[in-house]
Amino acid sequence: MNYSEAKNKFIEAWGTLCSSWGINKAMAQIHALLLTATEPLSADEIMEQLQMSRGNVNMNLRALIGWGIVARERKIGERKEFFSATKDIWELARQVSRERRRREIEPLIRVLDEVKKVEGKSEEAKEFEKVIGELSNFSAKVDGALDKFSKSDKNWFFKLLMKL
Amino acid sequence: MNYSEAKNKFIEAWGTLCSSWGINKAMAQIHALLLTATEPLSADEIMEQLQMSRGNVNMNLRALIGWGIVARERKIGERKEFFSATKDIWELARQVSRERRRREIEPLIRVLDEVKKVEGKSEEAKEFEKVIGELSNFSAKVDGALDKFSKSDKNWFFKLLMKL
DNA sequence: CTAAAGTTTCAATAATTTTTGAAACTTTAG
DNA sequence: CTAAAGTTTCAAAAATTATTGAAACTTTAG
């Protein structure tokens, strides 16, 4: 396979995969493009390569920056802004797990805690309490594990996975 | 908070959370309802409680069955079908990771492998190979870890998490 | 076999999410 | 300060995804 074929295939696949994980396809494709770029790209280059509108590129770049996986850069002597992605995949995974934890696990834990203290001792209420309790317990474990992972040293985690 | 308030809040929250993970809200809500039910529910009961059409309930029930987290049941003396969800949260997590692995990680690995063998020795091609290689490596690790997790004994995994 | 009960399908519709593009805004060079 | 270059915003349009509901289909009791 030649380079540009491979690159397009990857950008497409990354977009599709991320879609099924609740991430906007355009955002994932911009990310894939930056991941494989040898140097920072400007909004114009992204628009050009992915055939997207300026507005779309701008919004999704900001979202990627919000996720902490893309950085804004300035090149000396250039007025334009350039963008580059975290190239280290482990660092990327850590950052994504940090953000998903903050954005999704923690709100879930908050709701579960709220809902946990249900009044009434009907059979339904008891079953509800039991399931919510288990879920709450499980979420706390996942939360803890993600926290550890997101703070962990790459090699330490690598070794742990090997031990599995 | 009283029982039905709590239950509705949970169903709503579960739907919203799952949406941000690429799972249809209706599907997540049906799942939440079955999770907290004391006994299997019929399609009619689900329609009634969640105010959804029969078609929607039927399609999403089938999807949940496809995920392996809801089972079809027959009650003796009843002609209707009833549905119940896996109540064990660990088992649920294992089953979901098993399925996501099969549906998403494995296709990704296949694409990465395909795209990995890129011809050409330009700087771009080399950078591309490097990033894809790292991703491929990482995906293989995740795949292996999910495989272990999905086959693991609950207590073994629990202890492992504690050690973290 | 027949009819009632129940389930599935799917084209049409509705809702949601994404994308566009042009106007408004900001920054900078001269 | 002015104008060119660049960036951001956001209402409207397009695309995608989810939902409905009624017809077709299947199963079962009698």
Image: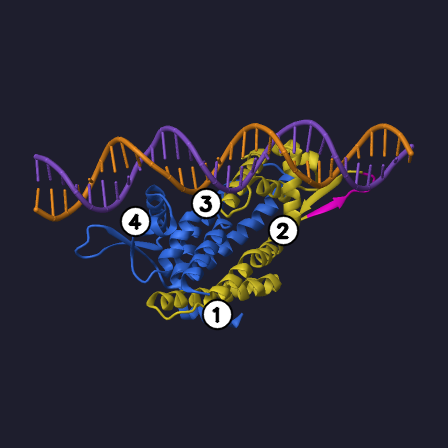
Chain colours: A blue, B yellow, C orange, D purple
What's the amino acid at mark 1? Leu
Q: Is residue B6 above or below residue A76?
A: above
The quarter of the image holding the C terminus of chain A is bottom right
What's the amino acid at mark 3? Pro
- Look at the numbered discs 2 and 3 and tell me whether their residues touch, using CB distance below 8 Å: no
- Look at the numbered discs 4 and 1 and tell me whether their residues touch, using CB distance below 8 Å: no
**Boundaries of the magenta span:** B71-78
With B113 as the anchor, is B56 left or right in this view? right
- Look at the numbered discs 3 and 1 and tell me whether their residues touch, using CB distance below 8 Å: no
- Look at the numbered discs 4 and 3 and tell me whether their residues touch, using CB distance below 8 Å: no
Q: Which residue is mark 2?
A: B67
Residue A152 visible? The answer is no
Q: Which residue is mark 1?
A: A160
What's the amino acid at mark 2? Trp
- Give percent across and percent down for residue D26: 79, 41
Residue positioned 23% across, 50% down in the render: A80
Q: Distance from label 4 to label 2 (Cα)?
A: 42 Å
